[in-house]
Image (cartoon, rainbow, N blue to C red):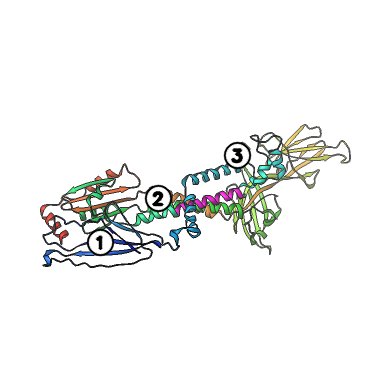
Amino acid sequence: MYTLKPSFSKTLFLKSPLLRSSFKPQFFPYTTQISSPCSSTPLSFSITCKLKTSEDGKSSKSLAKKIVLSEGAPAVSEDGAGNVEAQPKPASRGGGGGGGFGGLVKRFPRKVLSLLSNLPLAIGEMFTVAALMALGTAIDQGEAPDYYFQKFPEDNPVLGFFTWRWVLTLGFDHMFSSPIFLGMLALLATSLMACTYTTQIPLVKVARRWNFLHSAEAIHKQEFSESLPKASVRDLGVVLMGAGYEVFLKGPSLYAFKGLAGRFAPIGVHLAMLLIMVGGTLSATGSFRGSVTVPQGLNFVMGDVLSPSGFLSTPTKAFDTEVHVNRFYMDYYDSGEVLQFHTDLSLFDLNGKEVMRKTISVNDPLRFDGITIYQTDWSFSALQIRKDDEGPFNLAMAPLKLNGDKKLFGTFLPVGDSDSPNLKGISMLARDLQSIVLYDKEGKFAGVRRPNSNLPIDIDGTRIVIEDAIGSSGLDLKTDPGVPIVYAGFGALMLTTCISYLSHTQIWALQDGSTVVIGGKTNRAKLEFPDEMNQLLDRVPELVESSLSKQSDAISG
């Protein structure tokens, strides 16, 4: 059995005072819904009635009906202007009014999306990720387990509970590739996508849907409203077009907007954040890193130095490339402090062919086939000397511990019987590669010599010439496939953040006789919006009587 439930539209078609005495047929649309007890989906009748007046010489009324049946008919909603707009309604294909297991499964994704797009949850996820990043900065990453045993002992836990077990069990020794950190990033990314799908995309769809307001009452309900006597809605449209608005005219009604890009910007911000998180994840799980200190004149193979940082790390052919340190040298301030250090590098393929050569320095790395070599440190490898016109001999320089960050290197040249239990000799100390300080067998200062000066010095009957100071270059090697993605994400984030400050402004107008009723709203700069509107309205020209009559004829005709 079906129940007939008519629902009449509230749209009013009013006769303008400017219209002539002739009365044209008016249309009154209404919809009818038939509800079935076996289904929750209404069957909709769309009926249009055409009423003829006495002007046609007939007292009877004729009805022209158009009936459309649809199993998934959209619900009809009404806005404040009295305009009817169809809203899509998902069709229900289950019995029992959507109950049971099938209905539960259909409702479950929406509940999950609603939960994930919750703003407090997203804020909490962002704070959690920030806290984990701060913790990863505080805890030294990638050290051996013994380091954490000593740093976070169980007998003296940090904050009374934090020991090495927390670090190693939760993966805080490699925080940025740990499951807990990657899981939080995935949850935050899911929340961003859910928010975009459930909130931002519908807002953009609504913003792009332009409509006219056909009543002065609806226009006066906007954030800003004003009436212009003796004005034309077409002249208003020209003024708005000059101010950068997109203008639409339909009879006496006008709709205009600008700044629609500001509605798209939040979606761009979310996508940029997703790019940053994807790039950061790829960097943490798919990169290689390694460090090496190489004396001048020696070489190494890239693959022997690089170690994977995650389960997505995949070596390339460039890992077989051999790196040769041609020369290492340093620049100094006038005070003698180290200013900069440089390394002349050559890269060779498996056939021994040089494929690239470059002198690198701090902040000027070498990049080759996705691998970047950075100049990060230096050391003193060996001191080349001649003893009593014999040699040259290479004496290895050992780093000596000092209080502070100053470097000090030293070596020892035995003098006399090397098998004696009380072996003595000449000590040589250096802070850098530019000068060597020498001491005799008793530890007394003997003099200072510069490498390559060829100036001899006699100490305890031994003649010594400092020929060269051989340095070692400290290099860091890295492959990071996520860097381009992160850079692109940050660039997009800055751009879309700036675009998001654009105001999306909408303006409606209606020609009511000789008066134009104007209303508008904006999502930003609400305090400046009335001033902007008043400036635009001041530019609308005032119509004279002859223009008013022509305007009336144009509208009525």
Q: Which residue is mark 1?
A: 29
On the rendered structure, is 247 left or right of 158?
Answer: left
Q: CA distance from mark 1 to mark 2?
A: 42 Å
Which quadrant holds residue 334?
top right
**Label 2: few (<14), some (14–19) or many (≥20) C-alpha neighbours in 10 Å:** many
**Residues under labels 1 and 3: Cα distance?**
89 Å
Queried whether the magenta region covers residue 554, the answer comes back as no
Label 1 with label 3: CB-CB less than 8 Å: no
Identify which residue, 248 or 170, lies in the foreground.
Answer: 170
Q: On screen, 313 above or below 459?
A: below
> Residue type at mark 3?
Tyr
Q: Which mark is residue 333?
A: 3
Circle on res. 499: 2
Callout 2, which amino acid?
A: Ile
Tell me what residue is drawn at x 53 percent, y 43 percent: 127
Please count the marks in the image: 3
Q: Which residues are magenta?
A: 179-196
